[in-house]
Image: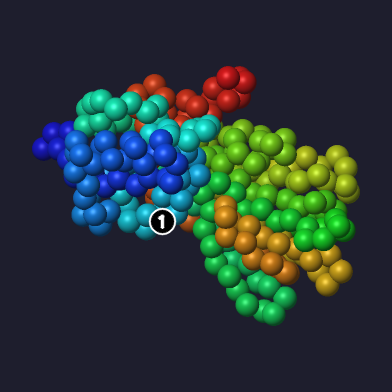
Amino acid sequence: MTRKSRYARIAFVASSSPEARQALDLFVRRHGDHRPEDCDVIVALGGDGLMLQTLHEFMMAGKPIYGMNRGTVGFLMNEFREDALPQRLAAAEMTAIHPLVMRARDADGLVHEHRAINEVSLFRQTHQAARLRILIDGKERLSDLMADGVLLATPAGSTAYNLSVHGPIIPIGSPLLALTPISPFRPRRWRGALLRNTARVTIEALDADKRPLAAVADHAEVRAVVRVDIHMDRAVSMRMLFDPGHSLDERILREQFGY
């Protein structure tokens, strides 16, 4: 069996933008459109938001996903071209990423479980700063962080919100996670930590009645949380396809040099 035939059955998904819908019509006419459960590969037409949505939707399906940029930034996407899609799929290089699992317990004692591809973030819900206690693998590492919040980012998500709050960029193959404060007030000098991707992170809300806290796993939000447990789920592997020379690892490396 050739590499090309592995991706013969294509399922297309697209954002709602006119450019993405036009591209969808073009590719369906040329290549057909299989159901996601029957396909060899999923081709996503849109921007980074559409790619994250597609990764979440098909997280457990084990299907490789190839994105083409019909959005704005397109950090997670390949360049859009109308021609040679089967050849590009055959030559594409694969990157496997794993999600974070967030288990958030709210003030009523209910536990909410969500997965995140980029990051799990905790934010203050009111005008008052959050007060947080941070444990790593069950051991207290920070007894009282006063800040707007804190986030835990994967390598794939380290160039997203994590970077905007001055967290470190992590190469895609590194066995690391970035724990980064959001506008820290005390301790002022704490700028975060790099953790092994086997670490289990627990964040507890201190004075939760007065300083309520929200937890967000990519786009899934839980309000009034009192405790959040986070770890990487290595049993779930999402496979992304990139054109040769334009892998996610290459893009993250380029980001570190500002281009």
Q: How many marks?
A: 1
Report which residue position mark 1 lands on: 57
Up/down of 250 relative to 32, above or below:
above
Whether residue 139 is visible, yes or no, is: no
In this image, 82 relative to 154: left or right?
Answer: left
Q: Residue at x 33, y 31 (%)?
A: 93
Residue that sits furthest to the bottom in the current view: 108
Q: x%, y% of residue 33?
A: 22, 47
In this image, 241 relative to 194: left or right?
Answer: left
Residue type at numbered disc 1: Glu
Q: Nearer the viewer, residue 109 or 76?
A: 76
Q: Nearer the viewer, residue 140 or 216?
A: 216
Q: Nearer the viewer, residue 241 or 220?
A: 220
Q: Quadrant of the N terminus?
A: top left
Up/down of 61 relative to 179, above or below:
below
Up/down of 2 relative to 190, above or below:
above
Q: Nearer the viewer, residue 167 or 20?
A: 20
Q: Quadrant of residue 193?
A: top right
Whether residue 245 is visible, yes or no, is: yes
Q: Residue at x 50, y 44 (%)?
A: 49
Residue that sits furthest to the left in the current view: 1
Up/down of 36 relative to 89, above or below:
below
Q: Residue at x 48, y 35 (%)?
A: 71
Q: Quadrant of residue 88?
A: top left
Q: Quadrant of the C terminus?
A: top right
Q: Residue at x 57, y 55 (%)?
A: 219
Q: x%, y% of residue 145?
A: 83, 54
Q: x%, y% of residue 143?
A: 82, 58
